[in-house]
């Protein structure tokens, strides 16, 4: 009852924000509630009967969270989760308000939350998580997380809030060091086989890759990847699973979700249900998602740091004829993308966004032919979609986060990210 006034205030603010800017202002209600009732977020997250599960790390959080939620729901669990754009405190509170009753209570057996690696450490102060899943530590944008050791420290603080288990990527040396420093919780692991890693000559984008591979008897191992499918070996039982997009990193996301679901469900875990849930899962927006826009099939590819840039560019179908590359204002210093080798793109039809000239220069140094530089993203999108359908592949838009949001708005793609 004590949170009812704060919930009412948050909902009024939400209505006002959406009237002022349709589709926007999603974090404002949470900001208001956190100020008026600072205990609401922790009290609500601690109130789910089967506890709180947190997914964090440099890359793969959004896709892993969506996969995990799908597996748990396939097992009959009622799950509260947050959109990938709501992974900081005010966004989390706003997401809770979307489903809360007038007293602020949120239905569900358990909560599965994606948390930003920096903000998550602050959100979880005083809040326990039943299980924490960690994806990886990658070299990030230098104006966001300038040092991988900084990210390691944040993730260690998040992992320390786990009361039952921490699920770690055994191929990431940083995460194994975090696991070694934990006491009183079970450590569950996942990773890729040596054969799978050998097919990724540039590695999987981790700041430090472990020297040894995980044995299948000790966790969940990706043993094969073929396009949009993979084989997971779960302690001797192999399951073929569908992936939302091409790339070993999506198979690793599936292994993360699989291992975490097993950690949550214990003896109730059913491999058949998990495989079906993964196979039926559509991509998270822009993470290899395909959609028909203005009568054209388009694939959207989001790049957020050097590791995701490299992995996602490498995952684009060979020979794709029509590519639009857009780099926006979120990339304050494009220099941290210079180590990426984008030569596999071959040719880009249009380079756009507020950092279009810098992006075009980087592509040129990688030997990529650039047909046109158009800083006006709206015009670039309209012209790109007006091109005749390609003979090979589909129209592909590669963008950073700012350009992704602008693309969604311009094209009227209003679904949850």
Image (spheres, grey):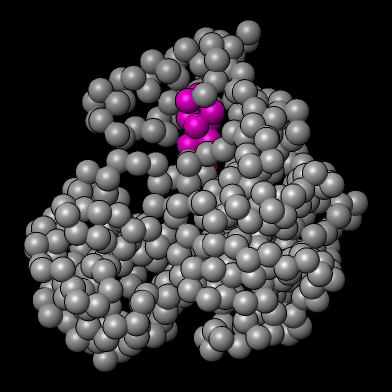
Q: Which residues are magenta?
A: 88-98
Q: Quadrant of residue 398?
A: bottom left
Query: In terms of secondary structure, what is the magenta stretch mainly?
Result: helix
Q: How many marks?
A: 0
Residue 164 x %, y %: 83, 46
Residue 382 x %, y %: 11, 58
Question: Which residue: 48% across, 37% down?
Answer: 91
Q: Quadrant of the N terminus?
A: top right
- Against 402, residue 318 (above or below) is below
Q: Note whether residue 70 is visible.
A: yes
Left/right placement of residue 411 relative to residue 207 reads left
Left/right placement of residue 233 relative to residue 339 reads right
Residue 35 x %, y %: 52, 25
- Against 374, residue 20 (above or below) is above
User: Any magenta on residue 104?
Assistant: no
Residue at the right extreme of this rendering? 184
User: Any magenta on residue 96?
Assistant: yes
Residue 353 x %, y %: 20, 63
Q: Quadrant of residue 319?
A: bottom left
Question: Which residue: 18% across, 73% down?
Answer: 390
Left/right placement of residue 258 relative to residue 106 reads right
330 or 200, which lies in front? 200
Question: Which residue: 31% across, 63% down?
Answer: 299
Q: Note whether residue 158 is visible.
A: no
82 or 36, which lies in front? 82
């Amino acid at each position: 009852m004590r949170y009812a006034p704060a919930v009412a205030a948050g909902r009024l603010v939400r209505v006002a924000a959406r009237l002022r800017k349709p589709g926007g202002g999603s974090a404002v209600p949470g900001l208001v509630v956190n100020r008026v009732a600072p205990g609401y977020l922790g009290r609500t997250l601690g109130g789910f009967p089967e506890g709180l599960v947190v997914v964090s790390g440099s890359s793969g959080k959004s896709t892993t969270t969506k996969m995990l939620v799908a597996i748990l729901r396939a097992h009959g669990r009622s799950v509260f989760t947050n959109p990938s754009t709501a992974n900081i405190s005010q966004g989390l509170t706003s997401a809770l308000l979307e489903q809360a009753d007038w007293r602020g209570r949120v239905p569900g057996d358990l909560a599965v939350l994606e948390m930003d690696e920096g903000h998550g450490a602050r959100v979880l102060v005083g809040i326990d998580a039943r299980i924490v899943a960690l994806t990886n530590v990658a070299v990030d944008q230098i104006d966001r997380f300038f040092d991988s050791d900084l990210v390691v420290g944040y993730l260690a603080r998040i992992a320390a809030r786990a009361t039952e288990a921490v699920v770690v990527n055994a191929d990431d040396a940083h995460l194994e060091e975090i696991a070694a420093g934990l006491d009183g919780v079970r450590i569950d692991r996942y990773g890729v086989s040596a054969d799978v890693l050998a097919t990724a000559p540039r590695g999987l984008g981790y700041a430090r890759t472990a020297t040894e591979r995980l044995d299948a008897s000790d966790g969940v191992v990706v043993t094969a990847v073929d396009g949009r499918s993979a084989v997971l070996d779960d302690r001797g039982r192999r399951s073929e699973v569908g992936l939302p997009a091409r790339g070993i990193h999506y198979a690793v996301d599936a292994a993360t979700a699989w291992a975490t679901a097993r950690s949550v469900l214990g003896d109730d875990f059913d491999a058949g249900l998990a495989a079906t849930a993964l196979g039926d899962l559509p991509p998270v927006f822009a993470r290899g998602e395909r959609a028909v826009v203005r009568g054209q099939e388009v694939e959207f590819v989001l790049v957020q740091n050097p590791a995701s840039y490299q992995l996602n560019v490498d995952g684009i179908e060979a020979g794709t004829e029509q590519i639009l590359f857009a780099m926006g204002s979120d990339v304050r210093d494009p220099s941290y993308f210079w180590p990426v080798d984008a030569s596999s793109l071959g040719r880009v039809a249009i380079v756009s966004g507020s950092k279009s000239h810098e992006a075009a220069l980087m592509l040129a140094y990688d030997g990529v032919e650039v047909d046109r530089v158009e800083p006006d993203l709206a015009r670039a999108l309209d012209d790109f979609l007006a091109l005749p359908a390609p003979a090979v592949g589909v129209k592909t838009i590669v963008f950073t986060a700012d350009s992704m949001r602008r693309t969604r708005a311009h094209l009227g793609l209003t679904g949850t990210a």
